[in-house]
Amino acid sequence: MPHPVISARQLTKTYGDFTAVDAIDFDVAPGESFGLLGPNGAGKSTTMRMVGAVSTRTGGELSILGLDPNQHGPDIRSQLGVVPQQDNLDQELRVRDNLLVYGRYFGLPRKVIAERADSLLEFAQLTDRAKAKVDDLSGGMKRRLTIARALINEPRILLLDEPTTGLDPQARHILWDRLFRLKERGTTLVLTTHYMDEAEQLCDRLVVVDKGRIMAEGSPAALIREYSSKEVLEVRFGSDKNAEAALSLAGVGERLEVLPDRILVYSDNGEAALEAITRLGLEPITSLVRRSSLEDVFLRLTGRSLIE
Amino acid sequence: MTATTSTEQDFAPRRSALYAGNTRAVIHRGFLATRSTNGLVVLSGFFEPVFYLLSLGIGFGALVGTVQTSTGQEVPYAAFIAPALLAVSAMNGAVYDSTWNVFFKLNYSRLYHGMLATSLGPLDVALGEIFLALVRGAMYAVGFMVIMQVFGLNLAWTALLALPAVLLIAFGFASLGMAITSYMKTFNQMDWIAFIMLPMFLFSATFYPITVYPEAIQWVIQALPLWHGVELVRGLTTGALSPMMLVHVGYYLVMIGIGIVFTTSRLRALFLK
């Protein structure tokens, strides 16, 4: 890896007795799109706040662009763009003014900010809403404006904390498209998510976190290869019969996962596994063969679903 | 091995963690934002002391006649309470902005979260917000000064000096107000501010000389900030200068210093934890 832009060693954050981030190690290379995948409360946001130099670590080492955030918070923040989980747009200002004022917080000259604001409004597809009140924007528009705002200082790293949580599918796809363009331009992206499809779409590499620890690390494809089979067969026998049926399924596929509503059979050939089940004389109410996803990786690593 | 040697360091650090020297960006934001605020809310804070002046000064004043100030001067009742109400209007403006407005930005609009994710430091934000509160206090006070002039309640040329004096008062209340607000989490707690402000307004030698109280209570009143403001402004508008004024000014300088240090450390604790 070339010189990493973010480097964490044994990075730890505790609040009283509670350990939010538990001695994690990771590096992010310039231009890379790096993801933190995990359920709510896994420590993703806390990690993002430390990387964003707005939270002081309790232990370990952290270096952002070669600087220690404990000493150089404002310098580091001048090189970052931050898209927080909760929108914090300035509701007392209009859309374009949000960009202008935010640029001033970085001490940029007015002329530079004005030029960037116009091209960012275009990038965020908000040019015709430049004079609108923030409150009148839809959820997806607010997110795009937040991203545009985060880009006003031409950051070297863009931090996105659950960028599409709460958006409808269409708004998510527009947002993914915008983020993908940034990635193509070489902006380093660091994002947290609990959506597997989002991680698969956007991340070159990701870490799976749970309870403040890193459970696994790699590209989405590599993680699936390592922790799951090529395909998954999902069968349902009815809520109270799944556990019973699972007993007879032992030996079908490489591995079984019994969930309250269905059984997951991990196998490189899902259709063959389904045939094996029918040969056993069992008749599932529904069956579905699909590709393995990061959800399966997560289930394998933690025994729990990502979204509960 | 330290973390800084493991990655490339390619720009020189220049800002301190607390202060980026960019308070003007916060002030600029404040002025842009006032365009969208409700003008009536702003004006209500201005009219409150004006109504007191009209009802008590003109109406009640007809019954009272003259009052003796702390320097022994006999002045008409309206001219006695007007400088006190001037100090109050500066206080109201500063407190309104630094408590309710700051409370909302801290807990609901998350404005400071956004600001402190940039290269601004907590001191930039604190100074900017305090300055804006001070401007509001000053606007109230200038308006009130004009009314005093119209009613002939400025008795000496030194009344002009009351303007910088009320700025000082507004600055003191704004900086301490913001620090105290940073501890407030609920609307109920915010009501406590009004609960403290009202008696301070009524009892700080605003409407009658402090000598009506027993000595012990006089000490309590003299420990409170408004009394110092009232005495300072009254001395200036009635033209009775005294060395005690230096004490009043000193009181506010200390209050401003404590308020700024306190607010900055609180913002740091709240947002950079």
Image: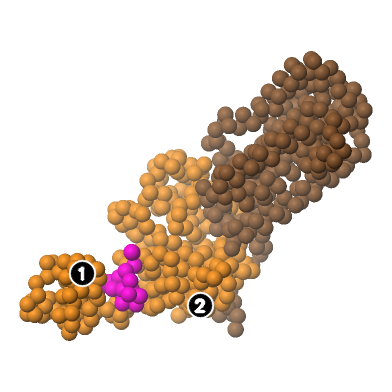
Q: Are marks 1 and 2 in one subunit?
A: yes
- Give the residues in magenta: A291-308
The Cα atoms of the two marked residues, 1 and 2, are separated by 35 Å
Inspect the magenta stretch and tell me whether residue B57 lies in it: no
User: With respect to residue A32, does B189 lie above or below?
Assistant: above
* Within-10-Å neighbours for mark 2: few <14, some 14–19, many 20+: some
Query: Which image quarter: residue A308?
Result: bottom left
Q: Amino acid at mark 2?
A: Ala
Instruction: Find residue A211 and name its label.
Output: none
From the viewer's side, name the closer residue of A264 and A87: A264
Can residue A5 be seen? no
User: With respect to residue A302, does B91 lie above or below?
Assistant: above
- For residue A284, side relative to residue B89 (left or right): left
Q: Are marks 1 and 2 in contact (CB under 8 Å)?
A: no
Q: Looking at the picture, how far across and down is residue A192, in whole percent?
A: 41, 65
Q: Residue at x 13, y 66 (%)?
A: A286
Inspect the magenta stretch and tell me whether residue A298 lies in it: yes
In this picture the colour scheme is by chain
Give the letter of the brown chain. B
Give the letter of the orange chain. A
Q: Earlier in the sequence, mark 1 or mark 2?
A: 2
For disc 1, the chain is A
Q: Looking at the picture, how far across and down is residue B134, in whole percent?
A: 69, 40
Q: Amino acid at mark 1?
A: Arg
Label 2 secondary element: strand
Query: Residue beneath label 1, please?
Result: A262
From the viewer's side, name the closer residue of B5 and B88: B88
Label 1 secondary element: loop
Q: In this rendering, which labeled residue sits more in front, label 1 or label 2?
A: 1
Query: Residue beneath label 2, please?
Result: A23
For disc 2, the chain is A
Q: Residue at x 59, y 63 (%)?
A: B273
